[in-house]
Image: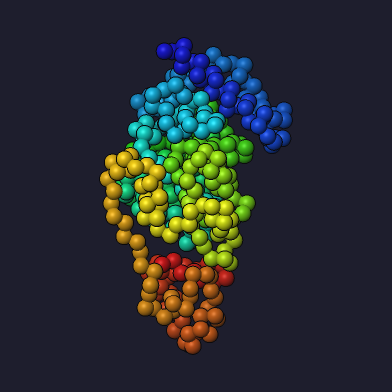
Amino acid sequence: MSKHLEAWIALGLHSALCRPWFEGPVPADDVAPGPLLAARKEKLENLDAYIEQTLNWQAPNRHLLTWASPHYPTLLRQIPDPPPLLYVTGDLQALSGPQLAIVGSRKPTPTGRDNAEAFAKALAEMGLAITSGLALGIDAAAHQGALAGKGVTIAIAGTGVDRVYPAQHRKLAHQIVESGGCLVSEYPLGSPPLPHQFPRRNRIISGLSVGTLVVEAALSSGSLITARQALEQGREVFAIPGSIHNPMAKGCHQLIRQGAKLVETAQDILEELAVLLGQQLQQLELVPVSEPESETDDPLLQQMGWDPVDTDTLIERLGWPAEQVAEQLLALELDGRVQAVPGGFLRRR
């Protein structure tokens, strides 16, 4: 078994370090003479030492999962380019059930962040594991929502699994593992956050999942790469629509035009997955989802709509004195129903 595993470690190392160079453009800094190239060269030239280090890394909650392992996720095995070796920190059982990927912008609007957390919480309460990339913005909100729903969440790293990136998510990574989830990477231990590694790891996010939900994304967002890969892998793609004035919604609108399923509630996703998963989904401990009411009797909220609006516009629409509008905005902000944003205020619920 040891020699067999050593061979898989070597294959995984070569696949992670060398294969991207033959698949498309790689940033010059990644291949130019310097510390990064020297580190890669050292790993490949000292393969025996790296294999020993990797074997010694294993512990009760640290796993090496080869493509040949019976614990290797079935859906990931089916994609065109499955990683030969996965480094996993946490509970392997988290990878065995149905997963839904939730992705989106690293700089979302407050509404986008709220939606990511709310959808993740509701779907986690239904029993789906929530998979994302531990990045800033939507990824973090998805992980946090799943944790709030007392569910399982899985983070796919674009670095070595022993290096949390960004560093401010170390606490979140710890919470994911402590709550029965796991951190997963195909990259060798100690791998730094190189730009080309993150788009490549996205195929794992979508490959593990029965579907991918894009919450909020600009046209240039990397989450559209994940959505494209999900389609290429034969998986479902869902998108939440937004305001036509919101640049962070344009990526979702493009996906919807291209055939992604428009969803407004977590129940919309569940209904689609019920057809796809059948018996597997029936085995989940499904919990009815209570969707938040969007109707309101508050005249100020009614006049705000769902796009950012400035105070002068609200004064004009309501016909109220400026002081009354300011007082009501402050009360609603303290209640968490509106949020100050550049250009005015945004309704949150």
Relative horizontal placement of residue 333, taking residue 14 as reference (left or right): left
Q: Quadrant of the C terminus?
A: bottom left
Could you tell me which residue is drawn at 49 percent across and 48 percent down? 237
Give the image location of residue 155, x and y in percent.
45, 40
Task: Report the residue at 63% width, 51% height from top.
Answer: 220
Can residue 2 be seen here?
Answer: yes
Picture layout, residue 337 above or below residue 325 = above
The quarter holding residue 173 reads: top left
Please tell me whether residue 263 is drawn above or below residue 28 in the rendered image: below
Q: How many marks?
A: 0
Q: Please give the name of the residue rendered at 51% of the width and 33% of the height, measured from the top-left corner.
A: 79
In the image, is residue 277 above or below residue 81? below
- Position in image of residue 303 (x %, y %): 47, 78
Residue 117 x, y percent position in the rendering: 41, 54
Q: Is residue 162 visible?
A: no
Q: Give the percent coordinates (x, y) of residue 9.
A: 51, 20
Q: Which picture quadrant has residue 301?
A: bottom left
Residue at position x 32%, y 49% in the image = 125
Which coloring applies here? rainbow
Using the image as rendered, state which of residue 95 and residue 233 is in the foreground: 233
Quarter of the image for the N terminus: give it.
top left
- Residue in the foreground of this view, choosing between 147 and 287: 287
Q: Which residue is nearer to you in this view: 34 or 211?
A: 211
